[in-house]
Amino acid sequence: MEFATFADRAGTIEAEPAALEVVAHVRDLFADAGSDLEVVARFVQGRVFPAWDSTTLDIGPSACYEAIARAAGTNVSSDDVEARLAEVGEIGDVAANYDFGGQQGLGAFTGGGGGNGGNLTVREVHETLEDIAAAEGSGSQDRKVDLLFGLFNRCSSEEARYLARIVLSEMRIGVGEGTVRDAIAEAFDVPTDRVERALQVSNDYGQVARTARDDGLEGLDSTELEVGRPVQAMLAQTGTVTDALEEWETAGVEWKYDGARIQLHHAPNRSNESTAETRVFSRNMEEVTDALPEVVEFAAAHLEEPAILDGEVVAIDEDGSPLPFQEVLKRFRRKHDVAKAREDVSVRPVFFDCLHAGGEDLLAEPLTTRHDRLRSVLVDADADPVADDEIEGLSLLWRTDDPDEIESIAAEALEAGHEGIMLKNPDSTYSPGRRGKHWRKRKPDVETLDCVVTGAEWGEGRRATVLGTFELAVRTGDDSEERRSAGSAVEPQNLETVGKVATGITDEKLEELTDLLEPHITVAEGQTVDLEPAVVFEVGYEEIQSSPTYSSGYALRFPRFVGVRSDKSPADADSLERLERLHDQ
Ligand code: AMP
């Protein structure tokens, strides 16, 4: 296909306001693309390489301005190009406004010199862009500019418009991924959902378009994951325990690690361990293998079959306890001095999903099956049976319909220094690139409440000697600063209950709380005790509901213990007024 034809079609698409018509134009473009279909399917989205490929042109905007300036003539400088860009706001318009061509020198050696376009093909443009990407080492920036100048020098205005946009990955003709998917389906008469699946698996619009055309549905359906080629990561929405349990019969619950997403691709070589191929990708499918030698070592030590694993890399201190996210960033994209950086901060991978194992794709399997497979990939087949929590690198997956159990998992996660929990639909398949409702990160508390502890209950069985459930209350009456700073005592009649908290507390903490509260017991009746207002708990919750159950007229939904506010007296606890305000919000 002539590049001028591509530019002309791109212009038509850009001018088309109706989405359905856009699909029809892209469909026709694909149908006419012949042997350039793969490239055209990428160019139309402003891509030079497949989405999974982290190759870049490695050419910055200023190099592009310089190439444009040189092609535009001796009286144009790259400063002029930049100044015009500031005025016009878009590089395609800037490039299209120059009169290119006829520049001598390097333009000639790439075979150009026409200036009015018409002799450049899509293939030539693509091959030159590949050469630009491949140029490395000293002098490579000059060589890149020379090559690009050679292309612009042969462009008509409209060709220049789209070349500039492709080079800077700013195609902006209104063709998104959905449009390309629909256009492939229409052009080659295959169902959209099967195109979609092939796209998820291959991450290459060019390949999928060609497969749909040349091999039809059968070809699309046999498109498989490839170890070494990254897949888009499945993403999470925020959500609540309430929603999760309402929608799914049981929820899958995992710790949420505060690190950076990784996708590990491992292809072992059974005869020679040192030639195993291990690659690690970021959430954006960028390769980060060299920055994370610990992950490569982990794979060599633990993986015996080809696998694609989804997980998180977490920074750890000397004891193996997790460090904050910022520490991972010191390692994540590092290109130089990795060994030195590793001395300062080490990292460890934790895996929560398995997309491929032993030659089998698992995207369409339910989460529980994928997690079982993950477990079996990480466990040495010949070793004695081990408990899940002893398997290095395995993120545990609980299944429960009990909100209290979810709260205690969340408490343990926080206790262990992690961020919170993820709630996952146990029956859901893996949807690459989707921020669906099957994965939910538990919404952080909007605002915690500081409540006075007004009562408690002794535990049962093993916990009979500790207080386990705590009644919470807020203050009524005067909310003025004056009164609070006066530190006046809060009388029990000035407190209204809002709920009970029993979750989020470890055994050790329960003992501590019992010691703290026992001296304040005023009435003991069976398992229940009344407490004089003395201790303030900070509590998190998912929601404040109107409720007749407690005297305040409100109830905290899923309250959980955050900590003791030893710096606060009951007079500093939150008031009914604030509770009402938060409820109304
Ligand atoms: P966010 O970055 O806040 O959108 O939260 C989603 C991210 O949490 C994912 O992309 C992962 O990087 C990370 N994460 C940590 N633990 C898990 C887990 N158990 N399952 C899924 N994602 C997790």
Image: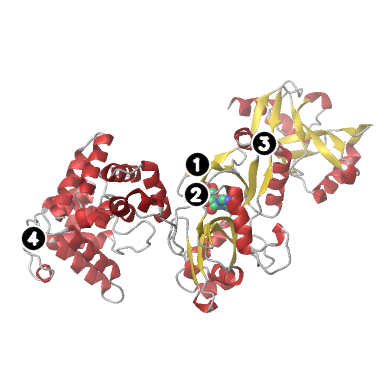
- The location of residue 560, given as percent across then percent down, is 71, 39
Q: Kindly identify which residue carries mark 3.
A: 541
Structural distance between the alpha carbons of marks 4 and 3: 67 Å
- Residue pictured at 73% horizontal, 32% vertical: 484
For the residue with label 4, is its CB less than 8 Å from the closest atom of ligand 1?
Answer: no
Closer to the N terminus: mark 3 or mark 1? 1
- Residue pictured at 46% horizontal, 49% vertical: 432
Quadrant of the image occupied by residue 174? top left
Quadrant of the image occupied by residue 273? bottom right
Q: Kindly identify which residue carries mark 1.
A: 436
Q: In this view, does 420 lie to the left or right of 172?
A: right
Q: Kindly identify which residue carries mark 2.
A: 234
Question: Who is closer to the viewer here, 405 or 490?
Answer: 405
Structural distance between the alpha carbons of marks 2 and 4: 47 Å
For the residue with label 2, is its CB less than 8 Å from the closest atom of ligand 1?
Answer: yes
Closer to the N terminus: mark 2 or mark 4? 4
Badge 3 element: loop
Badge 1 element: strand
Q: Kindly identify which residue carries mark 4.
A: 101
Structural distance between the alpha carbons of marks 3 and 1: 24 Å
Closer to the N terminus: mark 4 or mark 1? 4
Closer to the N terminus: mark 2 or mark 1? 2
> Which amino acid does the dot numbered 2 rest on?
Met
Quarter containing the N terminus: bottom left
Say few, some or many: other residues with alpha carbon within 10 Å of mark 1 (under 14 / 14 to 19 / 20 or more). some
Structural distance between the alpha carbons of marks 2 and 3: 27 Å
Quarter containing the C terminus: top right
For the residue with label 3, is its CB less than 8 Å from the closest atom of ligand 1?
Answer: no
